């Protein structure tokens, strides 16, 4: 078999493998929402109603953000998109207006549209307590931007709620979730690029 046929075979195998892996990943691997167009990408508990509402940013009247019209536990707002297990970079902005460092904003992941101990995980919050998530969201009346790396052990939806304090004191904006590329996928892309570049070089292109 000549060198050119070998290169063609390598490229074909790499592409076939990549397509096969892609076909196994039947879920979204990225997500973003700035709430300027409402809450069309979200749903409530069990896929029903929720207390989330898109409202005018109290710090910037030209911007729209997410808040909650009621304090509610057990998960309140969930992404309609389902994301596959793995490592992700999660970014969002948070504003707590209660002034007592306990506005109650919670961020987590859930296998379905409800927060249960066996299928959900609260990750970040503005409050602390037994078995609660990390108390890392600053609540001082100012917007703060956060970037976290999360490693989801199972397929999941993003999950939000205002769990404490009073209604409408926990604000979220500019959500972004991006999957970390799998090493195998990166390797396949590298092989394909190298093979194409080598073939072009042999042809004198």
Image (cartoon, rainbow, N blue to C red):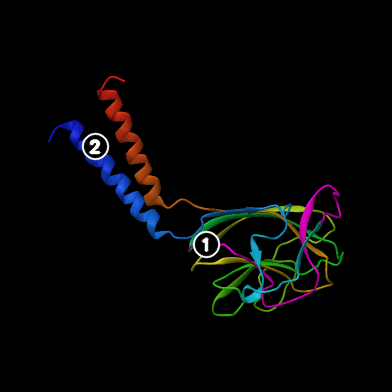
Residue 11 % position (x, y): 28, 40
The chief SS type of the magenta part is: loop
Q: Secondary structure at mark 1?
A: loop
Q: Is residue 78 magenta?
A: yes
Which one is nearer the viewer's eye here, 5 or 80? 80
The vertical placement of 52 against 179, above or below, is below
- The tag on residue 43 is none
For the point 33% across and 34% down, which residue is it? 194
Residue 197 drawn at (x, y percent): 33, 30
Front position in the image: 151 or 128: 151
In which quadrant of the rendered view does residue 118 lie?
A: bottom right
Instruction: Point out residue 155 in the picture as x, y percentages from the top left corner.
Output: 50, 67
Vertical position of residue 151 compared to residue 132: above or below = above
Q: Is residue 85 left or right of residue 150?
A: left
Q: Circle 2 — which element?
A: helix
- Checking the image for residue 8, the label placed there is 2
Q: Is residue 88 magenta?
A: no
Q: Which residues are magenta?
A: 56-84
Mark 1 or mark 2, earlier in chain: 2
**Disc on res. 83:** 1
């Amino acid at each position: 078999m000549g060198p050119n046929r070998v290169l063609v075979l390598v490229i074909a195998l790499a592409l076939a493998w990549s397509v096969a892996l892609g076909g196994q990943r039947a879920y979204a691997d990225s997500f973003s929402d700035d709430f300027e167009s409402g809450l069309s990408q979200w749903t409530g508990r069990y896929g029903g109603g929720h207390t989330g509402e898109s409202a005018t940013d109290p710090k910037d009247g030209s911007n729209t953000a997410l808040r909650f019209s009621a304090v509610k536990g057990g998960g309140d707002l969930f992404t309609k998109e389902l994301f596959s297990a793995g490592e992700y970079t999660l970014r969002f902005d948070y504003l707590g207006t209660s002034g007592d460092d306990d506005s109650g904003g919670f961020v987590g992941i859930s296998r379905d549209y409800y927060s249960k101990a066996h299928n959900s995980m609260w990750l970040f919050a503005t409050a602390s307590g037994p078995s609660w998530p990390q108390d890392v969201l600053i609540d001082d009346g100012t917007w703060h931007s956060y970037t976290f790396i999360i490693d989801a052990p199972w397929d999941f939806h993003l999950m939000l709620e205002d769990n404490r304090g009073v209604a409408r004191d926990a604000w979220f904006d500019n959500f972004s979730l991006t999957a970390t590329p799998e090493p195998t996928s990166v390797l396949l892309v590298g092989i394909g690029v190298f093979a194409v570049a080598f073939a072009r070089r042999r042809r004198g292109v």
